[in-house]
Image (cartoon, rainbow, N blue to C red):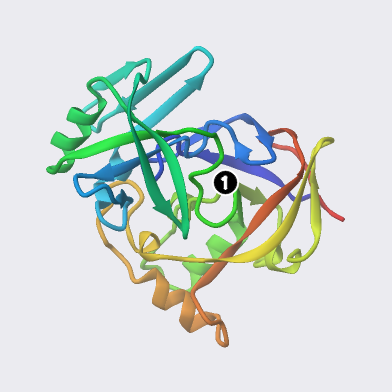
Amino acid sequence: MVAIEKIHVSPVKSMGLIDFDEAHISEHGILEDRRFFVMDAENKLVTQRQIGKLTQILADYLPRPEELALQFPDGHVISGEPGLGKPMQAMIWGRFVTGNVVDGDFNDAISEFCGQPLRIVRAHEPGTSYDEFPISIMSQATIDHLSSLTDGKMDFDSRRFRPTLLLSGAEVLEEDDWLGQSIRIGRQVRLRLVSRDPRCAITTLDPTTGERDFDTLRLILENRPGMRAAYLGVYAVVEQSGTVAVGDEIEAL
């Protein structure tokens, strides 16, 4: 049985992933996922590609009543209502995403931690700060297979690939077989698999420290001949909204 093993969410884009037991998936994805993003002093989007140690900060977000919390590696937590300040916009995967700079101690804290001026921006609309598509999917079998190709050097953690939904019970690369089709999750949700996921330099970083530790992109390219890029996992769009939970069965339609 193919089922959801983990639901990975990052309320602040490119910060560390947290796991939900269940989540509501709207047409734009999970409400709490990537609701915020980080910009630098030059008003450019910042991700782990520029600052790997962002993954060491764990963000949590409650939309109602609204509260943002940032937990740093030393255990220190800053939390509170994310007050909205100056309007901003960022270019994310070829589109402009608008929002407001978050007021409070959040910006000073992440700037000090990362060693440069940074600001957290709350997107005006939920589900607008993802990369290409709102949902990414990967199976644990695919990750285990990739680990087996390293001759014991690596045991990859799913967080390295940052899938929204991690699947158990699937065959290696079975998610690729669903491209162009729809899947049903539990009783409510339907997703359509629309694209392979082109991996980036973030997959070469340790998901706990953000330090580069393995040339994952080369490994993928060497073992997926004929691919134009280091594709691993798939992207999906939402055909029918609803709630999903860990353990929900997945059926290819």
Q: Secondary structure at mark 1?
A: loop
Q: Position of residue 110 (x, y in %)?
A: 22, 34
Location of residue 244 by image quarter: top right
User: Is residue 143 rendered to the left or right of residue 236?
Assistant: left
- Residue sitting at 55 percent across and 80 percent down? 224
User: Is residue 151 visible in this depiction of the protein?
Assistant: no
The mark tally for this picture is 1
Location of residue 127 by image quarter: top right
Is 112 located above or below residue 135 in the figure?
A: above
Residue under pointer 1: 164
Dividing the image into 4 quarters, which one contains the C terminus? bottom right
Location of residue 189 by image quarter: top right
- Crowding at label 1, few (<14), some or many (≥20) Cα neighbours within 10 Å? many
Q: Position of residue 229 (x, y in %)?
A: 50, 77
User: Is residue 99 visible in this depiction of the protein?
Assistant: yes
- Residue sitting at 40 percent across and 68 percent down? 152
- Residue sitting at 54 percent across and 34 percent down? 126
Is 240 located above or below residue 91 in the figure?
A: above
Q: Position of residue 2 (x, y in %)?
A: 75, 50
Residue furthest out toward the right: 253
User: Is residue 30 rendered to the left or right of residue 98?
Assistant: right
Residue furthest out toward the front: 87
Residue furthest out toward the top: 65
- Residue sitting at 59 percent across and 54 percent down? 133
The amino acid marked with disc number 1 is: Thr
Q: Position of residue 215 (x, y in %)?
A: 34, 71
